Image: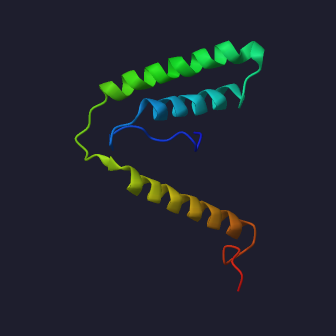
């Protein structure tokens, strides 16, 4: 899964159309392999983004949960911690036992 596509369900405040469109754009970029399509592919690319966004809106509207709403700040902090750990793990895998920090 593309790390740039963020979870959108069950947040307070609720997800915005802009966030749905951004996730849809990332999905289409990943699937197509294009960051920015050529003029020949632009219409198909943008249509796919709109279709994915529409499907996402319908999905998010149909989902139900009893779980408490997520905090955007808490989820961002968790993601930052996961990224820092991933970076430390990668540095250690390259032979830096202290994660690449200077002694």
**Left or right position of 15 against 1:** left
Q: Residue at x 72, y 81 (%)?
A: 102
Q: Residue at x 70, y 67 (%)?
A: 91
Q: Camera-side residue: 43 or 80?
A: 43
Q: How many marks?
A: 0
**Left or right position of 16 against 10:** right
Q: How is the image coloured?
A: rainbow
Q: Camera-side residue: 85 or 95?
A: 85
Q: Residue at x 52, y 59 (%)?
A: 80
Q: Residue furthest bottom?
A: 103
**Residue 25 rendering spot, x and y as whole percentages:** 58, 29
**Left or right position of 19 against 15:** right
Q: Camera-side residue: 29 or 21?
A: 21
Q: Camera-side residue: 38 or 10?
A: 38
Q: Quadrant of residue 62?
A: top left
75 w.r.t. 43: above or below: below
Give the quadrant of the C terminus: bottom right
Give the quadrant of the N terminus: top right
Q: Residue at x 57, y 64 (%)?
A: 85
**Residue 100 rendering spot, x and y as whole percentages:** 71, 74
Q: Quadrant of residue 66?
A: top left
**Residue 14 rendering spot, x and y as whole percentages:** 34, 38
75 w.r.t. 41: above or below: below
**Left or right position of 82 against 9:** right
78 w.r.t. 101: above or below: above
């Amino acid at each position: 899964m593309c790390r740039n596509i963020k979870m959108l369900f069950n947040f307070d405040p609720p997800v915005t159309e802009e966030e749905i469109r951004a996730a849809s754009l990332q999905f289409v970029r990943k699937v197509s392999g294009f960051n920015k399509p050529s003029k020949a592919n632009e219409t198909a690319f943008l249509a796919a983004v709109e279709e994915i966004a529409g499907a996402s809106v319908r999905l998010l509207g149909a989902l139900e949960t009893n779980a408490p709403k997520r905090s955007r700040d808490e989820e961002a902090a968790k993601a930052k911690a996961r990224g820092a750990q991933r970076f430390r793990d990668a540095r250690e895998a390259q032979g830096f036992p202290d994660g690449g920090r200077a002694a």
